[in-house]
Image: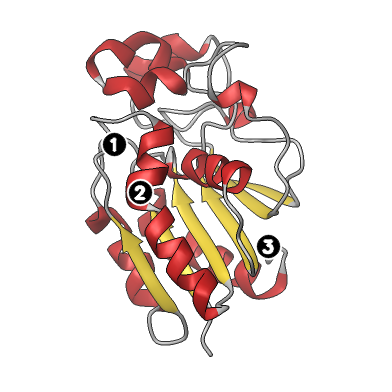
Amino acid sequence: MKEAIVLLHGLGRRKTSMNKIEKHFKEEYDVYNIGYNSLKYPIEILVEKYLTEIVNELNDKGQKINFVTHSMGGILVRYLFKTHEIKNPGRVVMLAPPNKGSELANKFYKIHGPACAQIMRSRNSFVNRLGEINFECGIIAGGRNYYFFLDKYFKGKKNDGIVAVDSTKVKGQKSFIELEKGHTMIMYSDEVIKKIEHFIKNGKFLG
């Protein structure tokens, strides 16, 4: 039986943003590229509405479930693991996740919906109450900001234009790398996709 890979896009994006990753893995894995209405619902409802059915289906088949996420998609996976049983968990690769929140969410949450408010960079925000992760996770942070006018929100911290590098890290992570990629395009990089594949197969990043 093939392993499964569940793909989750980020806030304000569509599942088409993960199409290149889907195409790369679809011959070797059963790939589920999930689209969800990230601007309408809070994270708890997004998980219940868009993830529980497919996870239950894969659990019933006994299939190993890996995840590859972009940005806020990683926070959905953290909540999923906190609240649901994954009977045969694989590995998780998060691309540019706001694991400690995003400074831009603090600024723009009123126009980007309830989930955006949950990833604000503040001690008591939803994302900062999720705690340590309990699954095998590799994180790829972007260290290149192409939107220089947004630098003022990060107060000198290195960032990818949306998320500060230090915010991508989370207690319990297995592996971390930083690449010179911007937030909005990181999932299209051939270099990044090779790193994802190596971690999914080996539990560590190559190079």
* Lower position in the chain sequence, tag 1 or tag 2: 2
Q: Quadrant of the C terminus?
A: bottom right
* Lower position in the chain sequence, tag 3 or tag 2: 2
Q: Secondary structure at mark 1?
A: loop
- In space, the residues marked 3 and 2 are separated at their CA atoms by 21 Å
Amino acid type for the residue under numbered disc 2: His
Please state the horizontal and vertical placement of residue 73, each as a whole percent of the image: 43, 44
The residue beneath circle 1 is 38
- Considering only vertical position in the picture, is 84 above or below 115? below
- Marks 1/3 in contact by CB < 8 Å: the verdict is no
- Considering only vertical position in the picture, is 55 above or below 198? above
Amino acid type for the residue under numbered disc 3: Phe
* Badge count: 3
The residue beneath circle 2 is 9
Question: Which one is nearer the viewer's eye here, 66 or 84?
Answer: 84
Measuring 35% from the left and 70% from the top, which residue is drawn there?
Answer: 22
Question: Left of 106 or right of it: where is 134?
Answer: right
- Marks 1/2 in contact by CB < 8 Å: the verdict is yes
Question: Left of 49 or right of it: where is 166?
Answer: right
